[in-house]
Every structure is written in C-alpha cells, then in structure tokens.
Image: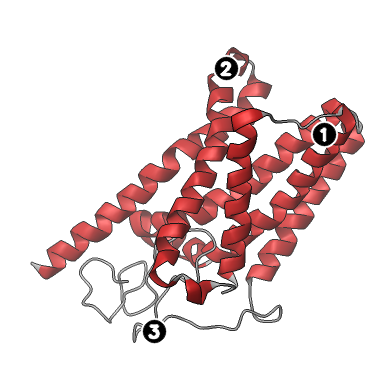
Amino acid sequence: MVTQGTPPGRGRNAAGSGPGPVASEDGPFSHPTFTNNGGDVGRRAMTRRRDPAWVWMIGAFGGALALAVAVLAAHGTGPDGLRLGVRVTARWAFLFFWLSYTGGALAIVFRPAFAGLARQARGLGLAFATALQVHIGLVVWLGVVIGQIPLHGGLLWFFLVALIFTYLLALLSFRIGMRHLGRLFRPLLFLGTTYILIAFGLDFVPGALDQKAQHWPYAAEYVPFALLSLIAIPLRLAAFLRQRLGLRSAAA
C-alpha cells in the first residue's frame, strides 16, 4: 500500500521524508502491515523467540491478572467484587483493542507520531485477545457465584459472536487457516473487528448516557471509553479518505 504522492512500489515513511515502511489501516490481528522499499510484505516467522506479539500478549495478560487480583483483594470475591473485576478487566482489554483498531488510521491521519503504534497493530490485537481471557474467567466465576449466566437472550448471543470473532481472528493472525480465505481475509478482518468494537460500544455508550454519569466515579468508568468507541470508526474513515484523495492527487 502506498501513501499520498508516492508512486506504486516505492513507499515513504510516516513522515513522508523518504523511502520506508508505509502504514496500513487493516487493524487488529492483521499480518505485518508495512511494506519495504521494494513493496514486499515482511514474512517474519511467527515464533515465540522472534514474534514481538508474545511480549504484548504476556504483558496484557499479566496486567489483567494483576488488576483482577487487586480488585478482588480490595472488594472481596462476592458478586459486587466480581462485577467490578469484570468491568475493570473489560476496559483494560479494550484499550489494547482500540489502539490496534485505530493505530494504522492514526498513523495515516497524524503521521509520524503514531507510526510505531501502527507497526504493533497485530501484537496489540493479540494482547487484547489474551487479556480478554482474564475477563471471561471472571464472568464465568460471577455466573457460578450468582447461580445464573450474567447475560441473557439476544445480548448474550451478541457478545458470544464477538467472542467467536476474537478467537477466529487470533487464530488467523498466526496463519492458521489463512490459505483457505485468500482475498476474504481483509473483509473478514474489518467485519470482525468492527463487530467487536460495536459490542464494546453497546456496553460503554448506554452507561455514559445514564443519569449515574452525573457522578464522577461512574462517569470515569464509562464516558472516556464511550468516546473512544464512538471516534474509532470516524478515524478509520478519515484515514481511508486521506489515502484515496492522496492517491488521486498523485495520479493527476
């Protein structure tokens, strides 16, 4: 992929100052989304020793686990403490997801400041999937304590589909089943990650609009995350338009 004013096959770096990697807005779980000067996609081996995603995954899981332990130690392992742990770990995982979903777009719109973030899109997406395991564990624990599934009906199925997308995209990021998808991978990537974003938004946005948001502790728990949910798609759209307009002006 090329940026504005750059002839095909000769990428320029995020600052536009010379040959270098070119950001893509593919988002979470994607393969390396930068091209070299010759336009070849980096094919680094997906191994524990060489894949930087493992660092993000271990850090995200460790952070989620530490947050869960801290919350349960302070508030107990009853329903209230578990519910708080569920909310805290969900927000921790969401931060990794949001950075991965918007990293490429931020690099395109704002240029050099976010170029490094865009390079880590896959690692951040996998960090989200890993941190989410602590969240899911707390949800299951809460269900055991209260004697019922915390979610019901259509909402339960909606979030289950989001969870399935998370696991599916995580597997595909390690090239498991990739050869059967071909050109369908990028549409599936966009569909799956946007569905996950909407699932988060269905939790954060109504909470931010609740009357309880007049109190700052509740507002701090919902409003910032609701805003991040709402601006993610416009950021991706802005990046898409900037790329298309740049390519058109270069061809003119």
Q: Position of residue 95 (x, y in %)?
A: 60, 47
The answer to which quarter of the image holds residue 142 is top right
Total count of labels: 3
Q: Secondary structure at mark 3?
A: loop
Q: Which residue is mark 1?
A: 143
Q: Name the front one of labels 1 and 3.
A: 1
Tell me the CA gap for discs 2 and 3: 49 Å
Residue 124 visible within the image: no
Query: In the picture shown, does residue 19 fall above or below 241?
Result: below
The answer to which quarter of the image holds residue 222 is top right
Q: Residues within 10 Å of mark 3 (few under 14, many from 20)?
A: few
Work out whether residue 122 or residue 110 is closer to the camera in this orientation and state it: 122
Q: Which residue is mark 3?
A: 40
Q: Residue furthest left?
A: 252
Tell me the CA gap for discs 1 and 3: 48 Å
| Tag 1: amino acid | Gly
Q: Is residue 101 left or right of residue 2?
A: right
Mark 2 vs mark 1: which is more N-terminal? Answer: 1
Q: Secondary structure at mark 1?
A: helix
Q: Secondary structure at mark 2?
A: loop
| Tag 3: amino acid | Asp
